[in-house]
Amino acid sequence: MITVHNTPVCLLGGRFIPAQSPEGREKTMVHAILSAHNSSHEPGRLSIRFDAMASHDITYVGIIQTARASGMKEFPLPYVLTNCHNSLCAVGGTINEDDHVFGLSAAKKYGGEFVPAHQAVIHSYMRERYAAPGKMILGSDSHTRYGAYGCMAIGEGGPELARQLLKKTYDIAYPKIIAVYLTGAPRPGVGPQDVALALVGATFKSGAVKNAVLEFFGPGVASLSMDYRAGIDVMTTETTCLSSLWQTDEQTKTALTLLGRGDSYREMAPVDGAYYDGLVTVELDKVEPMIALPFHPSNAYTIREFKANMADLLHQVDADAAQQLGVKNAPSLADKIVDGRFHVDQGVIAGCSGGAYQNLKRAAEILKGCAIGSDAFWLSCYPGSMPINLELTKDGSIAQLMAAGASIRSCFCGPCFGAGDVPANGAFSIRHSTRNFPNREGSKPGDGQISYVALMDARSIAATARMGGVLTGADELPDVPADRADEQWNYDDSAYKSRVYFGVGRPQPETELVFGPNIADWPEQIPLPEDLLLTVCAAIYDPVTTTDELIPSGETSSYRSNPLRLSEFALSRKDPQYVPRAKAIQAVEQLRRENPSAPKVKEALNGYDPAMTGLGSLVMALKPGDGSAREQAASCQRVLGGCANIAGEYATKRYRSNVVNWGMLPFVAENLEKLNLQPGDRVYIPGIKALLEGDGDTISAAVLRHGGETPVTLSLPGLTREERDIILAGCLINYYAEG
């Protein structure tokens, strides 16, 4: 089905042979795009300027506030502000809509494009309006992936978008390029989510494609429609790759023509002799309907395997729930097995992965003339954009879904991160969406709640709905409709023309920004002191820590425009004592700066010089940062006085970048389990400012606990000169203010 080769290969005559040297890298599609956007003359380094950017309403206020504080006068490139995350105004009164009003005023003032709530999911909109061969797009959402259109798109934290608004560049080391070679054609009932979950399952745990760019090509591409390609492509984020890119063909050209942008088409394919750092082969005809069990998209099995081993696999989910969520007495999922069949409580088809036209069309065909039934199972369907919704309405698909008992919702990302369709306590939800991390469905284990999300394709979700909630793979149906490679849909953008504010390139400087009472400026951050004495305020020994655990999504995101208010939720579902611990240290540090001779300061500093030694907090995690690009996962730590993270490794480049851009030290240390840091331990780091002013990347520190000291070596691998200067300044805003 999927085979991963971790050694370099060269493409010759349609075959792959072992590569003896990196010659031929310039023959890849990725190299051509990167070269066209790169302004760096340093070998092995890239300085990228993007063609367009996009943000949604969890992130754009902070980005604009950061850029505004750093001197931005107008948007120097097309910048799309969508409102597809905090579209519901059920939490915090007016604050969600206040941010939307701010966004519209910013689009007018600085010259941007504003997409009102319920019009489109961010990535559906960007595919329809901006993605094109040879282009590069930066988005403040981790699923910024438009590779199916020959467009290299990257999801990053807000500070990286602020840099582009300030006419700076996106600076990274030249990434590895991994070939993803597709053969065959999918069988009826096998959808893009099935292929994507198989790919994630084959690559995530080994880190085979981490921070690389995946280049998709091969004879199998021609068997896939554009919706199908995009459905695989958007899920590449879950492999932890940096970006993705697909070869283009007549299907790409036709899709762009239907979108009114046919003149942007160009043919793209690797040149014979292209060099790749690795190879993933995908035999599409061997992929089966898949299910990714809680609590990660890589926890993937064929539905056939799951049914054959339900008791054992569900027992492991129960164990993971008890360990990761701390819910010890939750009802066993084995109780959902009745007469040998597994019963599901909820189905959701939504977002940038599930809400595509073809997915909902197949679901409607599978459910035509059937009824979901009046028992516990229920189904919600969210088209990805108003043009998709309009076409599904015109061709009768929406009517078919409604007649079957499905609930049709607006163009909204909410179910993907716990802001809509939260299941009941103990319920099991199957979703064609992007993630099934702990709490991602919106439950609150700290309040004794727990529910579960498994990822599946829309086709198998519809098959399950047709069977009244009994888990069913679409290939088990006798009449499952097949997907056609040439299937397109008629794009009618009249809804956009009626509602979207198109202001790109037309700033109105006289426009006043509209600030609601919850929109606040970033609090001041101080430069790095000579030495640091940091208190461990959270220690996480899970194999991977997601950004959803660092700053929970769902209703907490309503406070994203108020840094101090949002910081109160930091690690709240993982370690509820983190915030009070960090605030206690922050209060003493504030006192140190005001009165360094205060008794409380002397006691806290343990004899170290108060004029030289700053106090702060740190978070220790084995592998933090998987998942969302949201900068708040780092900025909330900084707002609470955080100065550093100590990790075995960072799960994603984007989270590490967020840590740096918010002025925190991204330390790496070996043997963290053996060191066994715990909340309350302190780490003394002398000479840290001098280290960053120079070019060193390791420093000797000491762990202070129980009256003794344990030496530890902390590393800062790959820290660039600019990253050093950002940390020295205290954060990106300070860095630009100095310059």
Image (cartoon, rainbow, N blue to C red):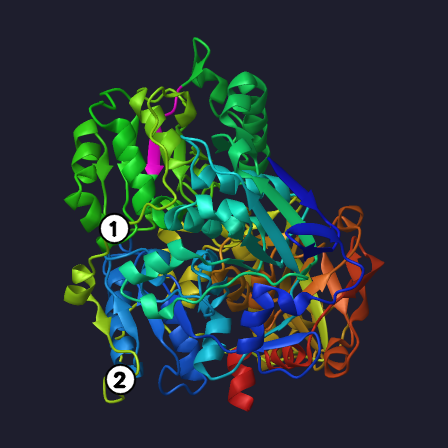
Q: Name the residue under label 2.
A: 506
Looking at the picture, does residue 108 appear above or below residue 668? below
- Depth check: 246 or 455 in front? 246
Residue 493 percent coordinates (x, y): 20, 61
Q: Residues within 10 Å of mark 1 (few under 14, many from 20)?
A: many
- Real-space CA distance between mark 2 and mark 1, rounded to the nearest whole angstrom: 29 Å
Question: On the picture, is 187 further left or further right than 666?
Answer: left
In what element is the residue under mark 1? helix
- Depth check: 24 or 385 in front? 24
Question: On the picture, is 576 further left or further right than 481?
Answer: right
Q: Residue furthest bottom?
A: 739
Which residue is at 28% across, 72% downward? 113
Between circles 2 and 1, the one closer to the viewer is 1
Residue type at the position of mark 1: Ile
Looking at the picture, does residue 467 appear above or below residue 449? above
Q: Say how many tags the image has.
A: 2
The quarter of the image holding the N terminus is top right
* Membership of 461 in magenta stretch: no
Q: Which residue lies furthest to the top in this view?
A: 339
* Membership of 346 in magenta stretch: yes
Q: Mark 1 points at which residue?
A: 388
Q: Tell me if I can see residue 502 in this picture.
A: yes
Q: Which of marks 2 and 1 is nearer the N terminus?
A: 1
- Looking at the rendered structure, which numbered label has been put on residue 314? none
In what element is the residue under mark 2? loop
Residue type at the position of mark 2: Arg
Q: Quadrant of residue 82?
A: bottom left
Residue 156 percent coordinates (x, y): 50, 65
Q: How crowded is mark 2: few (under 14 residues within 10 Å), some or many (20 or more)?
A: some
Looking at the picture, does residue 700 appear above or below residue 354? below
Segment tinted magenta in the rendering: 343-348
